Amino acid sequence: MSAAPAIILVSEHHLDDLEGAFGRYEREYDVRSARSGVAAEALAREVVATGGTVALFVAESVLPDCHVLEGFHRWRAVAPNARRMVAAHWDRFLTDAPVLRAGLAKGKYDAYLLMPRGIRDEEFHHAVTDLLSDWGATVAEPEVVSAKIISPVRDARVLAIRDFLDRMGMASRVYHPDDPVARHLLGDHVDDAAYPLVWAPERPAVEDATVRTVAMSLYGAPSDLDVEGTVDVCVVGGGPAGLATAVYAASEGLSCVVLEAEAIGGQAGTSSMIRNYLGFPRGISGMRLAQRARNQALRFGTRFVTGWEVQGLVPGAGGAPHLVRTDGGDVAARAVVVASGVAYRKLRVEPLEELVGSGVFYGAAMTAAREMEDQDVVVVGGGNSAGQAAVHLARFARSVTVLVRRPDVAATMSQYLVGEIAYHPRITVTTCGEVVDGGGDSRLEWIDVRDTRDGSVHRREVGGLFLLLGAEPRADWLPTEVARDERGFVLTGRDVPRARWVDGLPPANLATTVPGVFAAGDIRAGSMKRVAAASGEGASVVPLVHQWLAP
């Protein structure tokens, strides 16, 4: 068994208080203590040199040999994936807070807390376990796994399966068929199994697995829904808008089905850390936010089906229900909420398109980030998703370059991310550049970047290219009866052309041109393209659904 991950406590005068508070973690973590920044760095180097990992640094707000933020900066160079917490003594908590809290916005550390004043300070320990849980979800090989993937190679298909499982909140590991764990699971079928093989508790093993067959094994197909007749509302898309719709619709007694083509959470579910979502002062990963919302909706009776792309919508006529079509079966619904969101725009550089999954990725691809250790990677995009991806990749990669066509990123990225990227020693921003070519022997090895100012082209050796190029609506499945703008986004309310108003009146704010079909979130023309805004629209659409369903 691998060595326990380390928690390093750093305090000159109150180490006894910290050691007492962290006594409860000693069974499962290697809790170590230091009285200075230099000593803490030496401890971290010792842990890493012996093949161990540092999960968490906990430092008092004042250190004897350096500013605490300088200490975090040095320790991060040794253990970039470790979480960092200030535990201020109660004598200094209010005094040090104004200066140190500013560092939170730039990602210099993860939490500012009051040191426990006694036993069972569960608010303090809630923050600690949150940080440890977040760390555990981002390590290369988690110790607690929900699914095991057995494969002789780690190809694009294996990576896609693992990414799906991670986004669904199911930690996984990949085992070679010769590994003792794999041999124990396979028994006498090691030689004749069809790989990749996915094993999850209380479910039959999935051989020759794909994302869809794994999703169907875990969550079923639309045809498996034990729905009698017609549901009240079918939500297409399991991102923040769709999840909010599901929670509020099901909690108010409506029968609700959510169809999601990929993993629950949508594009937001790939965000490694969302720091500006209301109510989460320490931030929350997109996956955790999505899975909490999913569990909340499940509690009220929502049915979820993942891994099935919707192929079409047949509007109901004369009071008949709408029909939502998928390859795995149809769902009849009295109301439909279109919350299918957006997809990242394609780069359309053919040599790189052929390497998607083999060093080239659309979106944050959090699972792929784990395989970028000691690699130089490039993130293309200037939005918040690109900034969050860069910060996450920097936990693993040797260097991360954010590449944008604009002269700067301030106009398109939230200020807290701009500051965090500027501060991070492993991240640089390259402006006025675009990727025009790339290649490698079976996986990405290099890209060509053209300077948009003078047309010069420079080649860079890279191990990963992450493309977050802006939004294209996932709306090809919608019929022509649903009006869309010139870019393909769904028109609602007063944005609908006057020629399609009924009796001189526009549709309701989130209603489309088809009665009983509504739109919420990023798919809607004019939406804000933020997680909180999408959640708000998802909640706001439910009263309109009620009005439609009312006798």
Image (tube, rainbow, N blue to C red):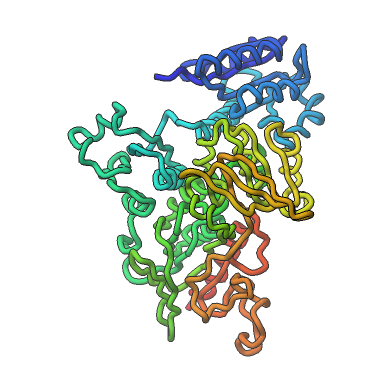
Residue farthest along the left direction in this orientation: 188
Q: In the picture, residue 501 is in which quadrant?
A: bottom right
Q: In the picture, residue 378 is in which quadrant?
A: top right
Q: Residue at x 54, y 39 (%)?
A: 369
Q: Residue at x 55, y 71 (%)?
A: 518
In the rendered image, the quadrant that contains the N terminus is: top left
x, y (%) of residue 529?
65, 59
Q: Is residue 69 left or right of residue 182?
A: right
Above-or-below relation of 264 to 59: below
Above-or-below relation of 295 to 245: above
Q: Nearer the viewer, residue 505 or 415?
A: 415
Q: In the picture, residue 87 is in which quadrant?
A: top right
Q: Residue at x 33, y 59 (%)?
A: 221
x, y (%) of residue 538?
57, 61
Q: Nearer the viewer, residue 143 or 429?
A: 429
x, y (%) of residue 33?
61, 11
Q: Residue at x 43, y 19 (%)?
A: 2
Q: Is residue 49 left or right of residue 115?
A: left
Q: Nearer the viewer, residue 310 or 512?
A: 310
Residue farthest along the bottom direction in this orientation: 503
Above-or-below relation of 261 to 385: below
x, y (%) of residue 299?
43, 51
Looking at the rendered structure, the number of numbered marks drawn on it comes to: 0
Q: Is residue 307 left or right of residue 467?
A: left
